[in-house]
Structure formats: C-alpha cells, structure tokens
Image (spheres, helix red, strand yellow):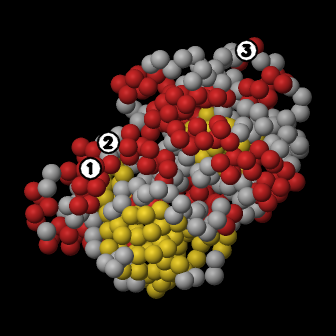
Amino acid sequence: MADRGTDRVKRGMAEMQKGGVIMDVVNAEQAKIAEEAGAVAVMALERVPADIRAAGGVARMADPTIVEEVMNAVSIPVMAKARIGHIVEARLLESLGADYIDESEVLTPADEVYHLDKSEYTVPFVCGARDLGEALRRVGEGASMLRTKGEPGTGNIVEAVRHMRMVQSELKKIAGMSKDELMTEAKNLGAPYELLLGIKETGKLPVVNFAAGGIATPADAALMMQLGADGVFVGSGIFKSEHPDKYAKAVVEATTHYQDYELIARLSRGLGTAMQGLEMSTLAPSERMQDRSM
Amino acid sequence: MVTIGVLALQGAVQEHVKSLQAPDVETVIVKRTDQLDALDGLVFPGGESTTMRRLVNKYGFYEPLREFAAAGKPILGTCAGLILMAERIAQEPQGHLQLMDIDVQRNAFGRQRESFETTLVVKDVAKDMEAVFIRAPLISSTGDDVEVLSSFNGEIVAARENHLLACSFHPELTDDTRFHQYFVQMVRESKETAPEHTAVT
C-alpha cells in the first residue's frame, strides 16, 4: 500500500530543500545554469518578476511548453506559479507533473477573497506571507511550505527582511504565551487555534519557511538565512545580473555558509553589476504585489 | 560515548540530529572537513544530490569522505545520501563518492506527485517501519557483499554493506527512530571492535 500526497510527503519535500536556493528560470538554458550552480529547484516562469512588473497588464500561469521544457532539461525539482485562487491553473500544473506549485502574488490574483484549498491536491504548495496570521492561514488551507512575500522584482531586500522579522518575533511571542491567551491571539491573528497550540509547543512553524521577494546579492541571501530563513528563492536577481552563472554560484555558496563572512566577501568580488533595484517609496500602492490577497 | 556527524551542506539536517539522540551519542553538524577527524560515524542526509555533490567538491569533501569510509567508520545515507554513496548511478557516467557496491536509479518512482508513504519490513530493524519516499531513488542491483534489508514492490529500498547503511526513504521524517538507532548501534560496535580507528586521522 502506498499513500500519495500526505502531509508528510508534501512537507517532507520542502524539508529536503532546506539550506538551498530556488531560482526563477524562463527556459531550459537558464534551468541548466541554475542546476549547474547548485540550485535545489527551479521555478519555471514565462517572465521573471522584474519583467512582469515592467510589462504591466495581467500576469498568468506560464505557457505549459515552458514548464515542460524546463522539466525535461533538469533532474532537480521544478516548481511553477499559479494565480491565487485559480483552481484550473493549479490543477493543470499538477497534471503536467510540476513538483511544487507557488500560489503566488507575483501573478495577478484570480480570486481576491479565497485562496485554493491546497489540502485537496497531491502536489504540494508554497505560499507567501508577510506575518504569522497570513502564514498560518495558508498552512490551514494546506500549504506545505511558506516564503516571505517581500516585494518581488524590486531587487530591494527591505520588505523580505520586514516579513521575516515579523514572523520570527510573532513566533517568539506565541511560544511565550500561556495557553489561555492563545484563543484570543488566534482571533487577533486570524489564524487557526490548533496551529498556535503547535507553535507554543515547538516554538516554530509547522512547515519550512524560505525567504523571497527582493533578494539580489549573495549578501542578501546570507542575511535572510541569518534572520532565520530555511532557504531562499531568488527571482529576478540572478538572470537580471551581468554574469548569471557566476552570480548563481555565489548565491548558492553564500546561502550554505551564511556566517562565513570572509567567504561571502570573496564571493561578492567582481560579480559585475547586480540587477537594478527599486526603492519602495517609488512604488504606487497598486504596484505593491505583497498587498495582493492576504 | 560515540560522536556522530551529520553532513550539513544542504538538506534536512536537524531531523537526523533528533533521530540519532541517545544517552551516549553526541551529534555534530558538519560543515568543514576538519570536523571529520573527531567523528565515529557520519550521516549523509536527504536533500538534492546534485546540489550536495557540487558542494562536496567545492569544499574539498570528496577525498576526506572517501578516506572516512575507507577507515571503516560507519556511514548512513538516506535518499540523496544513498545516491552519494553508490558506486554506479543509472544514466550517469559514474557515481559520486562510490563507497558502496550498489547501482542506483534516481527519481525512480517518478516526480513529486508520485511520492508516497508506506509501511516496510526492514530486516533486523522493524516489521512495521513507517517510510516516507520523496522523489526517491531505488537500488537496482547490489554487489556480493551487500545485504538487502528492505524491499518495496520487489525493488530494493534499504541495504547494508559492512559499515555502510543506506535507504531510499526518509526515516528522519517520522518519529520512528529505530533505523537511526540501528545505525547508532553499528557505530558503537565499530568503535569497540576497531580501536585502530583512533589512529586514522
């Protein structure tokens, strides 16, 4: 007898990615560069977030041809993004054999009220969160992995830092609460009470939590690890830099050895120009992807 | 007292540390080659084998790990760890560390949607071992000195060759620590019966 799509199988897949870097790629060639550099997985997309931001309009799931092209090019797991609440995009990606689906605010939400019931799928899901309430709502819906939302496609780490610090400080707060405070806290956070009970016991989230949204340099990746991330997603940072292959390798190493500053200094030398960054105050409210569907 | 390291280049490290717990076991998270000397046994965790292999090369672990195995010190590999240990890998020109006389096939059960959990009989360990398989490899054939410990649907998923122990599944993801404790016992016996190990540095 074999049970597929159980919590252990879905969450365990994310456990195996810990300490690693997941890279956005738009074709087979980039996927191979990512795999060669030591990425633990790739995210197959039609456009990286910086280009989605620049193009404007409605951003949708990638063309299945791209997802299949990337799946055929590498042996590491392949993830793909579906629009928030888009049941058919998610089922379609599952049927293609994507190894993980990112129900992602980088794409234009299909449903502004409801997220997917991710517990119903065999394929595991990762979702973004800016705080603990959001994180636990997503886990309650069946997400097997979390990531910070950050502000994708900006090359600016400030929002990812804010979100990681927020989740970490709220975790500590819950761990220090007495049991009789938890129900009111669950109400305030808008989070399932049972998940708060679990956090009080273990002091940590029930699933892996990666950093994402604005990571542009090896030092950024190491910073997020130091703040408690289990690993990092790098979106536009790598293939929008001057030398993607060198850049990709440097980010992988900085993530593994995030406390070895001499090494990170060496890695950061002569990498060429990083992606052009965006300052948050220049973004109009409508351009802030992180505020989509909370 | 035995000291067991968990190779921490990438993957699920803490879960192994937890499963190895015993009153006489000290665990070490291994990120540098100079940490290997103090160890009596070592675990290669699950993760992405291609990523781990690149980091093994990058940080000069390749020869030190082969020497560690050649010195007769026990090694446990789970999933990606098993792939690192195998002599031969299907569809690849050669194995990685080539420690164990087995052929492995990567992602043998399919993609993530085909990943599963089941209950296994594991010789000398348990008759009802909960086993989580994630994009798991399998052992397609074994050398003469390799003992098959467990099979699933006729495919080999756990094996031992003297001081080397490997499995396709993830015993570290369940609360069942019997597979790890079997390994801990291998480390204890190795340390007792081979005092010359202390001379190998």
In the rendered structure, are the residues bearing label 1 and label 2 in contact, judged by CB atoms less than 8 Å apart?
Answer: yes
Q: Position of residue A267 (x, y in %)?
A: 44, 25
> What's the chain of the residue with tag 1?
B
> Alpha-carbon distance for marks 1 and 3?
51 Å
In the rendered structure, are the residues bearing label 1 and label 3 in contact, judged by CB atoms less than 8 Å apart?
Answer: no
> Alpha-carbon distance for marks 2 and 3?
45 Å
A83 or A45, nearer to the observer: A45
> Residue at image x 72%, y 54%?
A98
> What's the chain of the residue with tag 2?
B
Q: Is residue B129 above or below residue B19?
A: below
B192 or B15, nearer to the observer: B192
> Residue at image x 40%, y 23%?
A266
Left or right position of A285 against B64? right
Task: Give the labeled residue for mark 3.
Answer: A281
Q: Position of residue B134 (x, y in %)?
A: 58, 63
**What amino acid type is highlighted by mark number 1?**
Pro
Disc 3: CA contacts within 10 A as few (<14), some (14-19) or many (>=20): few
**Mark toward the viewer: 1 or 3:** 1
Task: Give the labeled residue for mark 1.
Answer: B64
Q: Secondary structure at mark 3?
A: helix
Q: State the mark number for residue B60.
A: 2
Quadrant hosting residue B107: bottom right
A284 or A194, nearer to the observer: A284
Left or right position of B113 against B156? right
Q: Secondary structure at mark 2?
A: loop
Disc 2: CA contacts within 10 A as few (<14), some (14-19) or many (>=20): few
The quadrant of the rendering that contains the N terminus of chain B is bottom left
**What amino acid type is highlighted by mark number 3?**
Ser
Q: In this orientation, does residue A227 appear?
A: no
Q: Is residue A125 above or below residue A23?
A: below
